[in-house]
Amino acid sequence: MAAQADLSEVEPGPDLPVPSVAGRWRRSRTPESLEEERHIVLAAKGGDRSAFAQLYNQYVDAIHAYAYHQTGNRERAEDVTATTFARAFEEIARFEWRGVPYSAWLYRVASNLLARERRRPRWIELPEVTVDPGEGPEDAALRGERASRVRSALRQLSADQRRAVALRYGSGLRNGEVATVMGKSEGAVKLLIFRATRSLRQRLGPEFDERALAKPGAEP
């Protein structure tokens, strides 16, 4: 998890601090926590920097994990995360509370940034493999090959399926939360994930493991 950031005295921009590793986010949403978040968002809209820092601290790991899941590249994920929160800070005064977690808007911003990057001719996705000091070169090579096959199989999915898988497994959101982010019904999200995992099983065979979908850039 990223260290807690105090943005009260910081001008957010492209150099906003981001996690050095992809985090995972799981949080049960209750009416109380959502109401509490509404007050934080309203305070941030009113210019309270410490309130915006709370939103940043709560969601930065989740957005980074989502971007890393989509790109497999830590540097690109950090760029997308920083830009997402820079835009969030710039637009917080115009943000309209609609009774859903603030993260839904953040995921949409990150998704748009990722989609725009993919349309550029120079977009290249390279799987990033974390080095284990106790791992031999042969094991590291095999692990890298498996991670590469997982990413290759993910690229064969439809855009909606990849996004649903990234939100569900990469960011750890529940189906209902994924539905909110994607603007779809929960049933539609369940169908997307079912078809995606079925396709991945067919392509990967015995190598398929849902745990590998959490961080396709490196095996868990």
Image: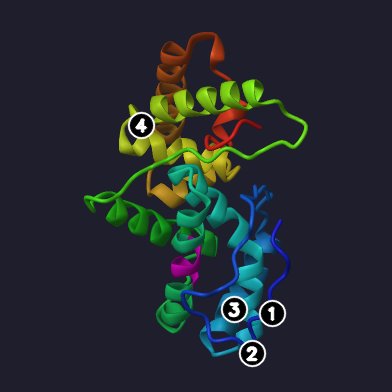
Residue occupying the point 59% across, 54% down: 62
Seen in the picture, residue 3 relative to 12 is either above or below; the reply is: above
Residue 6 is marked as 1
Question: Quarter of the image containing the C terminus?
Answer: top right
Q: Is there a contact, CB below 8 Å, between mark 3 and mark 4?
A: no
Residue occupying the point 35% across, 59% down: 113
Q: Is there a contact, CB below 8 Å, between mark 3 and mark 2?
A: no
Label 4 SS: helix
Amino acid carrying mark 2 in the image: Glu
The residue singled out by tag 2 in the image is 9
Q: Distance between the Cα atoms at labels 3 and 4?
A: 35 Å
Task: Count residues near mark 2 (Cα–Cα under 10 Å), then give few for <14, some for 14-19, many for 20+.
Answer: few
Residue occupying the point 45% across, 55% down: 76
Question: Quarter of the image containing the N terminus?
Answer: bottom right
Seen in the picture, residue 65 relative to 78 is either above or below; the reply is: above
Relative side of 41 to 199, left or right:
right
Q: Distance between the Cα atoms at labels 3 and 2?
A: 11 Å
Amino acid carrying mark 4 in the image: Arg
Mark 4 / mark 1, whichever is N-terminal: 1
Label 3 SS: helix
Task: Count residues near mark 3 (Cα–Cα under 10 Å), then give few for <14, some for 14-19, many for 20+.
Answer: many
Q: Distance between the Cα atoms at labels 2 and 1?
A: 7 Å
Residue 52 is marked as 3
Mark 3 / mark 1, whichever is N-terminal: 1
The residue singled out by tag 4 in the image is 155
Q: Position of residue 204 (x, y in %)?
A: 47, 15
Relative side of 133 to 9, left or right:
right
Mark 3 / mark 2, whichever is N-terminal: 2
Q: Which residues are magenta?
A: 81-85
Mark 3 / mark 4, whichever is N-terminal: 3
Q: Is there a contact, CB below 8 Å, between mark 2 and mark 1?
A: yes
